[in-house]
Amino acid sequence: MKLQSAIFAFAASLFTSGLHAQIDLGVLERDPNAPIPIAISGFTGEAAAALRLDLWTIGCAETNESEARFLVTGSNNGRLEGRLIYAPGKQQLLGKAYAGSNARLLAHAFADDIAQVFKRKGIAQTKIAFKVSAGKTSEIYVADYDGHNAVQLTRDNDIVAAPAWAAPRMLLYTSYRLGDPHIYSHDLNTGARAIMSRYSGLNTSAAVSPDGRRVAMILSKGGSPDVYVANVDGSDLVQLTKTREPESSPCWSPDGMTICFSSTAEGRSALYTVRASGGQMLKLRTAGVPNATEPDWSPDGKNIIFTSQMGSFQICIVPAGGGNATTLVEGEDPSWAPNSRTVIFARRDRKVNRTLSLLDVPTKRVKDVKNVPGSVSQPAWAR
């Protein structure tokens, strides 16, 4: 959610044609994944911590001032003042002051403005949902992407799982609160919730189309768990797969035309695609990586992130059209950020609890998400 506090420029100077000619941003334009060497100074406490993580998610690599290509300087005494300076020529590219009482939120707004200068999508003000397990029960929580401001959404005292964003302030999830697994919709503004799907058997793994109008889900009303599509209110249900083996974890292509999911139709778990309007399910090639599950399609449409069980759970990536898959890091339950660069996932610690971590896909760098409660899994990044 965008910061609503008053934001005003005190020395803004963005790319004029003359200034742009003096600044070597060519490498960033040629390779949007290239690490950006920066030095950060002047910020303290929560503002400094938030800013460092926010800039890390857009591919910045912090270094000392003598080696930095860009300088991020400022202060957060009462209000936050920030500047972005091109180090070789000492040209100021951005200068703003951000008024408000929450230093973290002000830092997030500044980080997103820096991302815009670098022609990268900022995610500092986005939200995540996730499952927190406690013994035999679990509940759904919502937090800022960095784990701060975690709020418990459900209090069902039962198994609650598979959160999915239906809108900026609306979630879908599965709950066993009435004995059977039903899919619920939950309005984060009012707290109101309703059953969206309550067919006999399994109702789970809701995934909402990019336009917010349709939902893919796994239902076992016909016997085996299959992929179905309906309107987001549950009407106009259509069955897309009809296999004897179970399907799981559907996700949508960004254009809303195709659904990717996992199936054991040929024995081992593999990824398949099917047209959202119906048709034949097609196996997606993930060469070099077996047992593919839990796919998530990047918002830019280029890649699919997924989990593979190869002794341990591994986060892997494959081009959206299929091909050679690459193993990135140990973990499970991957979910793309809106920037198609950062992924949030769950990993197991030595105590068998699970925690959330962030992955910078191009560099394979990982940072843990702090401030989340308990054993955490199944993160879903709001887009």
Image (cartoon, rainbow, N blue to C red):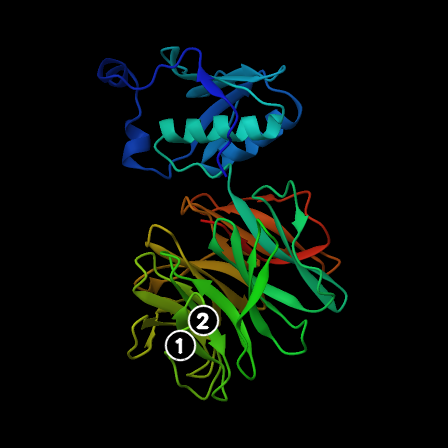
Badge 2 crowding class, 10 Å Cα cut-off, few under 14, some 14 to 19, many 20 or more, is: some
In the picture, the disc for residue 217 is none
Query: Could you tell me residue 199's position as x and y percent?
Result: 53, 81
Q: Nearer the viewer, residue 65 or 60?
A: 60
Callouts 2 and 1 close, C-beta under 8 Å: yes
Mark pair 2, 1: CA separation? 7 Å
Q: Nearer the viewer, residue 218 or 4?
A: 4
Query: Could you tell me residue 250's position as x and y percent?
Result: 44, 68
Q: Residue at x 47, y 24 (%)?
A: 38
Quarter of the figure with residue 242: bottom left
**Is residue 84 at all visible to an observer of this figure?**
no
**Is residue 346 at all visible to an observer of this figure?**
yes
Badge 1 crowding class, 10 Å Cα cut-off, few under 14, some 14 to 19, many 20 or more, is: some
Q: Residue at x 37, y 26 (%)?
A: 117
* Residue at numbered disc 1: 237
Q: Nearer the viewer, residue 231 or 348?
A: 231
Q: Residue at x 58, y 22 (%)?
A: 100
Q: How many marks?
A: 2
Quarter of the figure with residue 156: bottom right
Q: Tell me the amino acid under the disc marked 2.
A: Gly
Dot 1 lies on which element?
loop
Instruction: Report whether 383 appears left or right of 280.
Output: right
* Residue at numbered disc 2: 234
Dot 2 lies on which element?
loop
Q: Tell me the amino acid under the disc marked 1.
A: Leu
Instruction: Report whether 321 appears left or right of 45.
Output: left
Query: Could you tell me residue 253's position as x and y percent?
Result: 34, 60
Query: Could you tell me residue 330's position as x and y percent?
Result: 57, 57
